[in-house]
Amino acid sequence: MKTTRNTTARTAVLEVFDKSKTALSHTEIQKQLNDVCDRVTIYRILDRLVNEDIVHKISNLDGTVKYAKCNHSHQRVHIHNHAHFSCENCHEITCLESVKPSYIMPHNYKVNEINFTLSGLCPKCLNSNI
Amino acid sequence: MKTTRNTTARTAVLEVFDKSKTALSHTEIQKQLNDVCDRVTIYRILDRLVNEDIVHKISNLDGTVKYAKCNHSHQRVHIHNHAHFSCENCHEITCLESVKPSYIMPHNYKVNEINFTLSGLCPKCLNSNI
DNA sequence: AAATCAATTGCAACATTGTTGCGTTAATTT
DNA sequence: AAATTAACGCAACAATGTTGCAATTGATTT
């Protein structure tokens, strides 16, 4: 079977996530890593982290893709059904762990996953900007 | 001021939308158009149609972008706050006009737009596949 | 500690998707 | 029919993501 290894690049990526309170794009991670490893390696590390359920992938409204570390230390099984907030001003994406939408589906659909993204102004920009 | 023109390419794109019951990607539209116009032209037409509120743009979970014609003939003001369903099997995206999530936001956020995408199996694949 | 094995990496090359500038074409107005 | 300018085609570019392969390195075994 495949075992996963703790490489320096992987550790560096995880450290970047720990330092950040918001979700990060591949490019943002690359800039913070400052040539620790190749561009391609970051893509592969992110793929692995997503598969291992350590990081989750967020597709934003504007087509950008970001990644955030999951905080599900206490949960056995982890479902990414929380909401994300995307700020139109500073473009930061934050997880709204507490926001879980309720909805009623038509019959004959089997829902496996939901993605709920809200956009607008985050508290920081709402206060400073107006 | 800028006026919008009814060109053959634009008409052709709108016809493709009318023929389709699901949301379409740029590539899908291009294939159906069969060299009616250039690739770039399709991008520009789609941009315009989105601006004119005739078509809405859907960013999918997997990062793909699709477009669908709005049906809001009867409404004065149109808000795209309905849900979309993305089938994991056939990859079709359909608008779930009736599904509107309810949710409670933390304070200090100003929500301007929401994107609610569900994925799983659509009725067609749910019946035929299993 | 050295050998082994496979997971991981770097590099180069490629694919896809979307954008921009500019000269030309054609839809609409007069 | 002529004038105006929105829309177009083309070429070139940019961003993002993928793939193949040889070299490297982390973990395990001897």
Image (cartoon, coloured by chain):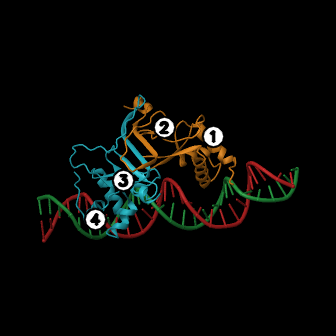
Chain colours: A orange, B cyan, C green, D red
Residues at discs 1 and 2 in contact (Cβ within 8 Å): no
Q: Which numbered dot is residue B12?
A: 4
- D12 and A55: which one is in front? A55
Secondary element at tag 4: helix
Q: Which residue is mark 2?
A: A94
- Of the two numbered discs 1 and 2 on the same chain, state the one appearing first in sequence: 1
**Residue A10 position within the rendered picture, expressed as x and y whole percent measured from the top left:** 65, 47
The type of residue carrying mark 1 is: Glu
Residue at horizontal 27%, vertical 44%? B78
Q: Which residue is mark 1?
A: A15
User: Which chain does the numbered disc 4 sit on?
Assistant: B
Quadrant housing residue B77? top left
**Residue C24 position within the rendered picture, expressed as x and y whole percent measured from the top left:** 29, 70
Secondary element at tag 1: helix
Badge 3 local density, few (<14 within 10 Å), some, or many (20+)? some
User: Which chain does the numbered disc 3 sit on?
Assistant: B
